[in-house]
Image (cartoon, rainbow, N blue to C red):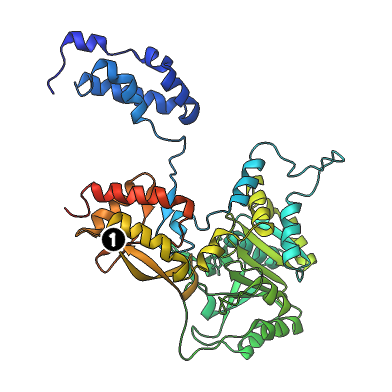
Amino acid sequence: MARPDVEVLRRIPRTDDLLRDPRLAARAEVVGPGAVRSAVRAAQDEARRGEVSPDEVAARAVALLPSSASSLRPVLNATGIVVHTNIGRAPLSAAARAAMADAMGCTDVELDLATGRRSRRGAGAVDALLERVPGAEDALVVNNGAAALLLAVTALAATPAGARAEVVVSRGELVEIGAGFRLPDLMQCAGARLAEVGTTNRTHPDDYAAAIGPATAAVVKVHPSNFRVEGFTSDVPTEVLARIAHDAGVPLVVDIGSGLLGPDRTLPDEPDAATALAAGADLVTSSGDKLLGGPQAGIVLGRADLVERLRRHPMARAVRVDKTTLAALEATVRGPVPPVTRFRHLAPDDLCERTTALALATGGEVIEATGRIGGGGAPGHALPGLAVALPGEHPDALATALRTGRPAVLARVEAGRVLVDLRCVEPDDDQALTAAVLAALAAGTGTR
Ligand SMILES: *Cc1c(COP(=O)(O)O)cnc(C)c1O
């Protein structure tokens, strides 16, 4: 389009007039005044370049506005990976979302409404955890699994003289949990000296017994949750290790990682808090947003005196959780089966009808597909399922169109095809997902 003449330029609405436009004023309540100003300026610029006519400027500014005040966008998880770290790990149950929403304003997180006195912060979440894990004397909720372990090691390794006490850990458990984040570095941050025992593939009871000495503050056992060592391997079971630690008068901390509160027959290799405590662990640490299916949180369960020591340590204040996390965690523990658990139990038969409908609507093909637990948990544990292999010659372009559509859809590209797996999509979202797939296919990216 040619540059508009002076007459047209003069007709472009002024900023103040646009900001008073009821449509833009209403949107400012949602996205904030800054975003509205930016959109107004961009729309005026387009009009100056002759790309929109002066009387379209307000409507154009509305169209340019983001959909919310946050840049985070909802994503439909069509990967078949149940706990996907890059899209926020566990999706919360409706019950947890509702509890979180209720706690978002002012709430009685640290107040006894009956007496008007201050109460123990997060008591409801702690009580819920203790009801589910009766073998634990006390519990503490912190910011994430890493914080739980950091606080445990810091509080236990702190000696009155300020000396760096020693933490005994197997070389087979000095794992990197993701994105360059290494547990040995974390424990060193805690001010503990690491006494490494055994080798990468084998650690024996004698290795621990020989390493524990007067400077030992704790023995730490870490579940190497994101890989499996196979072949000539051995590690020391929790109950044996607990006996060795207790004989030496030292507590045993077990980082189980993924946060199962009790044993799960479908995940026989996954450790759980109740079993670890019954085997003699003094403290168990875990994440809230992996297999537990709750909000980002770290959970410490175990001996009352040790949990209290952690609670009283100054670092506890730096890793404490907010009211909405406490609400969501309690609702996850007390409430209905969380999405993560529902999703991982889906069998091919459960997925057949929905997957077939999606294939029919999109011209795709139903294939067998394997889901995963993900999130650095239960490596090698396959979840047999189904997926729709979408038509098209350009899978990467189609996957990009899906990711950048509305709603954003994260699919999997495998063997040159885009696979859409409904395992981790709520049935209520099937319609929106189908529409998003059709839009991405229609954009031509599938067949170009
Ligand atoms: C995931 C994991 C952590 C870290 O937990 P975050 O909640 O991600 O901080 C620590 N230890 C183990 C064994 C894990 O699997």
As drawn, 55 above or below 256: above
Left or right: where 226 falls relative to 112: left
On-image quarter of the N terminus? top left
Residue 398 location (% of width, % of height): 26, 54
As drawn, 66 above or below 78: above
Left or right: where 69 falls relative to 338: left
Residue that carries the numbered disc 1 in the rendered image:
364
**Which amino acid lies under the numbered mark 1 shown in the image of this protein?**
Gly
Camera sees residue 404 = yes
- Binning the other alpha carbons within 10 Å of mark 1 as few (below 14), some (14 to 19) or many (20 upward) gives many
Q: Quadrant of residue 263?
A: bottom right
Camera sees residue 151 = no
Q: Judge by depth and name the residue closer to the eye, 313 or 281.
A: 281
**How many badges with numbers are in the image?**
1
Q: Judge by depth and name the residue closer to the eye, 64 or 426.
A: 426
Q: Which residue does the image show at 26% across and 22% down from the upper left?
A: 45
Residue 115 location (% of width, % of height): 87, 40
Q: Judge by depth and name the residue closer to the eye, 369 or 138.
A: 369
Left or right: where 435 falls relative to 138: left
As drawn, 204 above or below 115: below
Q: Judge by depth and name the residue closer to the eye, 229 or 5.
A: 5
Mark 1 residue element: loop
Left or right: where 122 falls relative to 374: right
Residue 29 location (% of width, % of height): 50, 26
Label 1 CB, ligand 1: below 8 Å? no
Q: Which residue does the image show at 47% across and 23% down from the upper left?
A: 26
Residue 386 location (% of width, % of height): 39, 68
